[in-house]
Image (cartoon, rainbow, N blue to C red):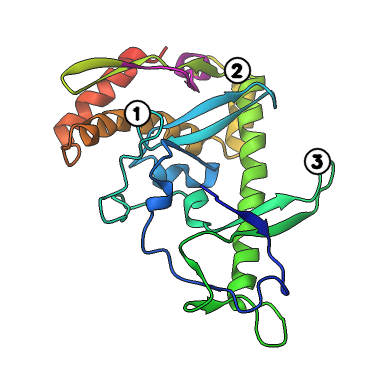
Amino acid sequence: MFKKLVPLNKDAHAGTKVLPINSFSFAKPFHIASMMVQEFARAASVYPIVFLEDKEQDEFKPVAMLGLEAGENLFIADDGSWKASYVPAIIRRYPFALARNSEQSEQFTVCIDEDAEVVSKDEGKELFNSAGEPTEVVENVKKYLGEMHQMEMFTKTFSHFLAENNLFTPLNMRVRYHGQIRNVTGCYVVNEERLNNLSDKKFLEIREKRYLAPIFAHLTSLSQLERLAMLKDGQAGLTPSESDDVEGKKEENVH
């Protein structure tokens, strides 16, 4: 996504401006987008939400599937617009990001992609005023990225809890596109049977931690795999009856 990510600096970026994002073409090569627990409710009506295993970090991370193959984002229109009602937060933060100052540090620096099309010297809203002070744009970016970081920490704890309680199982579902049945594998979902067999004490713990809603949103979202297949075939989306059929397939295939 980022071409030239550098720390935001009042000297280096004096006179730098940013434009509103009118095109999401920068996200066209990405078939997944990192997802935070707080997004599950809205994202679940559009994208399948699954978990990927990061073996280096020894953790699972939730992502929204934007395509069925690497390098494709089925939600980017030819004009660069986003073909869905909800855009993942990690996409909306562009061209800004937080970078940890060092591996051990808990301090973060706001960075900007200098080569982004929305970054300009000629038009847009300035990042710093004539006195070198951050403008409202930068203050809003700091607030937004700070909130995202807090949500990421909650999401990390949520995913760790699911893994610790052996609630993940490999996803093995089939969808039809281009006239063929394809298997969707390589990711993980919550195992409904194990979830239902948890002790009353553990289930109450999940409720107290407010994990129930995102878990059910994640499970419901799996029916959106059929939407991806239809988008890949150039169809607009699901009808209510088709959505019901996919829900049945989900319950049949996820064990």
Q: What span is colored magenta in the figure?
A: 183-195
**Crowding at mark 1 (Cα within 10 Å: few <14, some 14-19, many 20+):** many
**Residue type of the residue flagged with mark 3:** Glu
**Crowding at mark 2 (Cα within 10 Å: few <14, some 14-19, many 20+):** few
* Of the image marks 3 and 1, the number of the one nearer the N terminus: 1
Q: Which mark is residue 199?
A: 2
Residue 216 point in image, percent of width and height: 44, 32
* Of the image marks 1 and 2, the number of the one nearer the N terminus: 1
**Residue lying at 28% horizontally and 16% vertically, measured from the top left:** 182
Q: Quadrant of residue 21?
A: bottom left
Q: Which mark is residue 237?
A: none
- Vertical relation: 122 (above or below) 3: below
Residue 91 lies left or right of residue 102; in this view the side is left
Secondary-structure class at tag 2: loop
Residue 16 visible here: yes
**Which of the two residues, 3 or 186, is positioned nearer the viewer here?**
3
* Of the image marks 3 and 2, the number of the one nearer the N terminus: 3
**Crowding at mark 3 (Cα within 10 Å: few <14, some 14-19, many 20+):** few
The residue that disc 3 covers is: 103
The residue that disc 1 covers is: 68
Q: Quadrant of residue 81?
A: bottom left
Residue 43 lies left or right of residue 98; in this view the side is left
Secondary-structure class at tag 1: loop
**Residue type of the residue flagged with mark 2:** Ser
**Residue lying at 48% horizontally and 77% vertically, measured from the top left:** 124
Q: Nearer the viewer, mark 1 or mark 2?
A: 1
Instruction: Give the number of callouts.
Output: 3
Q: Nearer the viewer, mark 3 or mark 2?
A: 3
Q: Is residue 241 magenta?
A: no
Residue 13 point in image, percent of width and height: 66, 72
- Vertical relation: 97 (above or below) 16: above
